[in-house]
Amino acid sequence: MLQMTHISKVFRTDLVQTHALRDFSLNVKEGEFVAVTGPSGSGKTTFLNIAGLLETFDTGSYLLDGKDVSHLSDDARSRLRNEKIGFIFQGFNLIPDLSVFDNVDVPLRYRGFDGKERRRRIEGALEQVGLASRAKHLPSQLSGGQQQRVAIARALAGTPRVLFADEPTGNLDSLMARQVLEMLEEINTRGTTIVMVTHDPELARRAHRNIHVMDGQVSDFTDFSQAAAARDALAA
Amino acid sequence: MLAHNLFLAWKSLRKNPVLSLLMIGAIGLGIGVCMTTLTVYTLMSNNPIPEKSGVLHAVQLDSWDPNEACGEPNLPPSQLNWRDAQALLKSDIPKRQVAMFRSGFAVQEPSNKLPAFLAEARVTTRDFFEMFQVPFIHGGGWDASADRDQQQLVVLTKKTNDKVFGGTNSVGKMLKLDDREYRVVGVTEDWNPTPKFYDLNNGSFAKPEELYVPFGLVEPLELKSFGNTNGWKPEQINSYQDFLNAEEVWLQYWAELPDAKTREAYQAFIDQYVSEQKKLGRYPRPLNNRLTNVVDWMRVNDVVTEDSKVLLGLSFLFLAVCLLNIVGLLLSKFLGKSGETALRRALGATRWQIMQKNLVEVGLIGLIGGLLGLLLAFAGLQGVKQLYRGYERLVQLNGELLLVALGIALASSLVAGLYPAWRAARLAPAGLLKTQ
């Protein structure tokens, strides 16, 4: 699904150059749930921005769902984001003036769906996150967990191929965090690839694979699915 | 998408009412000032007879002082004297031609129920009505014999007919002008060419006269001019006949010359006429006879004053200053919403879609500002009416100007919004999402 090879990204100012990613390579298979961990400033967010086509890179190659995105125009990247990618942010990033329904509607409008199709998708997505009855509420009338579920519904409504989650539980208490994580796991079991950036090792362990990033490079990775399989085999 | 963007724009305006009102107020003020001056300017520079403005020509003969031109630069007088007008009327080169002047009569309606009133009148040859396309409700103008045979006929305007005959068809009825009986031959519709191009000597924006009588009556009835009379040398005038024979100019003269050939022929005719007059000791200046079409005539006579032009320029400058302020406010508004913009970009909006959304908001501000501007322009025009008596007829907003106002408001606000909308659309979404 994601094939990044020798990606590098340098942020330049008049005085300094910061190598956010250097020779970064990563392959995420379709249907995987990958956690990306690492200390602050390690390059996790830059990786996520590049993977989510929000940022360009300097060198290397990146195939998203088999398509080389290295030289796409800004418009083409926007279309690809809209069609194939869903985002979940730590701060929920809902538009405060719009109702829950209208927030979920935002990416669908840019997709060009007609009103009937949009309504079907919005209602389906809100149903999926258990907020169908809150469609007319404003974000400020919802709890943090509910707001994050609206963000998940917004990401799901467009039926993305891959979901990028940046600290999705960072602003939630433990109970709500667990609910959100369970929801992500359920989405993943339905076939959506998930790449989640997190600081929380507990959350990372729930993923199939944990990629550890340090100084803009993949420093280590742990395959929890193989470990789990080995554990299961030993137990048997 | 437009409807949705309008919905978002409306929400955005309501979210920050103070900023929105500031922008709407700035556009409204700019548009209000612009429309006030533009309304006056447009009506001043209006072509009052577009279908014929190229073929109607004011006739000027330079009978003036040998040492000093009548006007600068080297302009002949804008009116003719009696003798020259009589001579020119004999030409059959123009398709139509008219000699005329402003006069006035005491009008007495036949039943004597109403008190007599003073009415402004135009004393004119018969071609006036066809030449200047005067529309009639009843009857029409007089025929050539009326000018020749000194028939006491009159054409009334609708207003005068309403006043004297209660709006009925008065053709054939009699009324008294200065105690003489006149027969009504026609009633004109409301006809109000602005500017009053055919007689700029007596007020460029004056109302048309209230009735018309044949030019043939001038000499027998010794009709007096109520308009401007100018001369360049002292003359002994002891009788009406002395006045008619003097070099004093007081008659407006127009010729309808349908094509270049006729125009050339008529120019040759008047030059020939003046050359002959020179032999008789008249016309001491070099040949300087002019035929000037309507548009040029208004320009030569400075119908649009320099003040109006300067004011118009200043008002658009003021609008530009308002727009510059709006550019700053819009930049602050759009960049203040950079988090939302970044989110929309992340969710798949292209830069153009972000620009469209912002421009719709700017357009809405412009339209509301335009409506406010119209209210201010209306108030401004009332002020102009109070300040400048005689301009009352000019200072009215018509449907066309209302559309122009909204068009200018929309266009100027979109121009002002282009840069802020473009800047907002160019924001890199990656760095802004965390802070949203």
Image (cartoon, coloured by chain):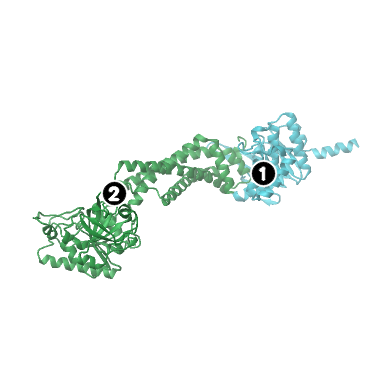
**Residue B424 occupies quadrant:** top right
Q: Residue at 25%, 49% (x, y): give it.
A: B115
A167 lies above or below B313: above
Q: Position of residue B293 (x, y in %)?
A: 28, 61
Q: Does A84 sit left or right of B314 as displayed?
A: right
Residue type, mark 1 in image = Ala
Mark 1 crowdedness (10 Å alpha carbons): few <14, some 14-19, many ≥20: many
Relative placement, left or right, of A198 versus B286 is right
Q: Position of residue B305 (x, y in %)?
A: 29, 49
Residue A51: numbered disc = 1
- Chain that is cyan in the image: A
- Mark 2 or 1: in front is 2
Residue lying furthest right in this view?
A: A236
Residue B393 image position (x, y, % from top left): 33, 49
Measured Cα–Cα span from mark 2 to mark 1: 67 Å
Using the image as rendered, state which of residue B89 and residue B336 is in the foreground: B89
Helix, strand or loop under label 1 = helix
Mark 2 secondary-structure assignment: loop
Amino acid type at circle 2 is: Thr
Q: Which residue is mark 2?
A: B305
The chain containing the residue under callout 2 comes to B
Horizontal side of residue B159 vs B373, given as left or right: left
In percent of the image, x 35 and y 51: which residue is there? B43
